[in-house]
Image (tube, rainbow, N blue to C red):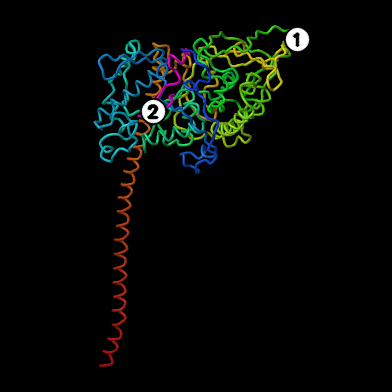
């Protein structure tokens, strides 16, 4: 994400997240420093666009949150990117450390460049222009993300991708044969925005980048939810299918830590995800379960057990994000479910910005703005989960029948202990006399433990069992072994991209087979139709000939009758004359 700075000459972009300086907060800056603040404005346009104007009716029904000064500047390819010199100079140094999406995006971009280079269409990348291919180019080349069936596989089956990022990846990729060179595009989006809005943006991007062309999707984490939404609404557009990885289809309670405690990285020095920042964002409100049944026993209160003197491991208010844990059993306690989509419940339980810790930091008007923002986003997020995932609806009949969905492959990790249970207990009354401006203790009345609860197989962030689409959707499950942040990297870097890409290739080949089969069926049907037409034509001609012959016969018979009827008169006249 970058911030646009206005100057006397031209606007400049300045990265405010995932730079080395910001990760380590060096030199130290306060949490609310404008150069590091990732907050979204809590202001809205309350006159939504006309229905369907944004490409999707659903997102148009809700007020639109203002974007602020920050804009997405691309995908996070590497956590640390050091670039020295001009990329056109001989002394250019590109040092990339800790790959995130870099291996995947580099491969896609190189594939896209190679595709357009071989077609000689004058385009550098698919995303360079959103203009439709002219008719002549379509005739001789691309049919979209896939060429004419069977042509490009034979032409490019032995082309190998070479990564210029690091030597380890090069070693693997040198023998990793790519079977599909095709136009590709990388969709970068502002992950802070509302989920319904992001779903719309993805589909609009695909329509503009590849108009009237089928698209196969590769998505990770939140991108998988967006892809699932787009495929349900526009299955023909995404007929080739999708391969998604590490998607939080049902997992949600873990995000309570992000909102209540905050998310700190790199020695707890990166404080860009504190609760007052996180509460301004919108996408994560759609991660929480709607019903108590969906929550299961993933959020329990152990206050009574502690009062009874039972021994319970409880690490109060310690961040568990990024921390390695062992497999741990379930902790018994009272189900602490509350309506995650009711802002008054968040306030009643002193969660996040409603806790006493923020009494002296936020005014009443600011908290009122937070509540209004949350109400808008929670209504939209809850409706999205009901409409798209079929969660929490009373009438299940609409979801009993399996909807038409293109081939869907869901990849998830089951090798890493992943905490999926949060513990809560009442804090012991404080002995200090300090109070906030709201006349309450500055300490939150509850303590939370994000580490000691049950851990299950997963990727360290998403439970394996919760990383798949609803049961009414047919899909293929693929098991991985890498952590959530590493899944889209090559195996040599601890990821699973090679395994994932095998599924991408296999899905693409299956799509080509289906298209070829349909073409063959269409040709056979056409031949039968023509054959039937020929037979039908012969029959029609025969019927016409028979009708003509019968007509001539009837005409001859009528003439004969007339002739025969006239003869007696002549005979009679002849007799008179005699």
User: In the rendered view, would you say 139 is above or below 464?
Assistant: below
Closest to the camera, between mark 1 and mark 2, is 2
Decide whether residue 17 is among the magenta residues.
yes
User: In the rendered view, would you say 160 is above or below 55?
Assistant: above
Label 2 secondary element: loop
Label 1 secondary element: loop
Q: Nearer the viewer, residue 333 or 99?
A: 99
* Disc marking residue 483: none
Task: Indicate left or right for 42 with 99 as reference.
Answer: right
* Disc marking residue 7: 2
Which residue is at a point 52% across and 36% down the rendered structure image?
Answer: 64
Report the number of numbered marks. 2
For this orientation, the residue located farthest to the front is 8
The x, y position of residue 17, in whole percent, is 45, 20
Q: Earlier in the sequence, mark 1 or mark 2?
A: 2
Q: Which residue is mark 1?
A: 308
Question: Where, quadrant-wise, is the N terminus in this rendering?
Answer: top left
């Amino acid at each position: 994400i970058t911030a646009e700075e206005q100057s006397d000459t031209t606007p400049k972009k300045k990265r405010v997240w995932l730079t080395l300086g910001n990760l380590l907060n060096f030199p130290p800056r306060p949490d609310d420093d404008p150069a590091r603040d990732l907050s979204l404005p809590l202001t809205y346009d309350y006159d939504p666009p006309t229905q369907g104007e944004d490409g999707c009716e659903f997102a148009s029904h809700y007020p639109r949150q203002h974007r602020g000064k920050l804009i997405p500047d691309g995908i996070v390819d590497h956590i640390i990117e050091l670039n020295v010199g001009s990329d056109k100079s001989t002394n250019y140094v590109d040092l990339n450390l800790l790959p995130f999406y870099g291996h995947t995006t580099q491969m896609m971009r190189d594939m896209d460049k190679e595709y357009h280079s071989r077609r000689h269409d004058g385009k550098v990348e698919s995303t360079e222009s959103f203009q439709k291919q002219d008719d002549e180019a379509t005739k001789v080349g691309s049919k979209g993300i896939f060429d004419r069936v069977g042509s490009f596989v034979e032409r490019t089956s032995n082309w190998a991708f070479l990564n210029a990022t690091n030597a380890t990846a090069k070693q693997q990729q040198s023998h990793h044969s790519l079977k599909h060179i095709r136009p590709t595009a990388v969709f970068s989006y502002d992950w802070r925005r509302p989920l319904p809005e992001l779903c719309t943006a993805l589909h609009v991007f695909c329509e503009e980048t590849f108009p009237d062309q089928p698209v196969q999707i590769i998505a990770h984490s939140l991108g998988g939810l967006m892809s699932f939404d787009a495929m349900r609404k526009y299955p023909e557009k995404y007929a080739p299918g999708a391969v998604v990885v590490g998607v939080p289809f049902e997992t949600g309670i873990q995000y309570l830590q992000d909102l209540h405690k905050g998310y700190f990285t790199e020695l707890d020095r990166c404080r860009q995800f504190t609760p007052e920042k996180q509460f301004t964002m919108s996408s994560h409100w759609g991660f929480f379960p709607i019903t108590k049944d969906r929550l299961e026993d993933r959020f329990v209160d152990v206050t009574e057990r502690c009062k009874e003197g039972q021994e319970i491991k409880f690490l109060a208010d310690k961040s568990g994000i990024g921390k390695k844990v062992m497999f741990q059993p379930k902790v018994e306690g009272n189900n602490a479910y509350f309506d995650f989509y009711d802002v008054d419940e968040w306030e009643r339980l002193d969660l996040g910005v409603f806790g006493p810790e923020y009494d002296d930091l936020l005014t009443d008007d600011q908290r009122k703005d937070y509540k209004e923002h949350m109400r808008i986003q929670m209504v939209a997020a809850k409706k999205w989960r009901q409409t798209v995932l079929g969660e929490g609806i009373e009438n299940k009949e609409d979801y009993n029948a399996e909807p038409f969905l293109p081939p869907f492959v869901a990849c998830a990790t089951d090798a890493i202990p992943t905490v999926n249970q949060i513990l809560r207990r009442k804090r012991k009354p404080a002995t200090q006399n300090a109070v906030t401006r709201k006349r309450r203790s500055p300490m939150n009345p509850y303590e939370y433990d994000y580490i000691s609860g049950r851990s299950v197989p997963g990727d360290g962030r998403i439970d394996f069992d919760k990383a798949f689409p609803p049961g009414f959707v047919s899909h293929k499950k693929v098991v991985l072994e890498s952590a959530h942040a590493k899944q889209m990297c090559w195996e040599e870097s601890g990821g699973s991209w090679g395994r994932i890409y095998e599924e991408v290739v296999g899905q693409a080949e299956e799509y080509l087979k289906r298209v070829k089969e349909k073409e063959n069926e269409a040709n056979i049907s056409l031949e039968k139709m023509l054959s039937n037409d020929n037979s039908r034509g012969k029959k029609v001609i025969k019927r016409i000939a028979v009708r003509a012959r019968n007509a001539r016969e009837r005409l001859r018979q009528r003439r004969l009758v007339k002739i025969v009827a006239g003869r007696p008169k002549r005979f009679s006249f002849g007799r008179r004359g005699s």
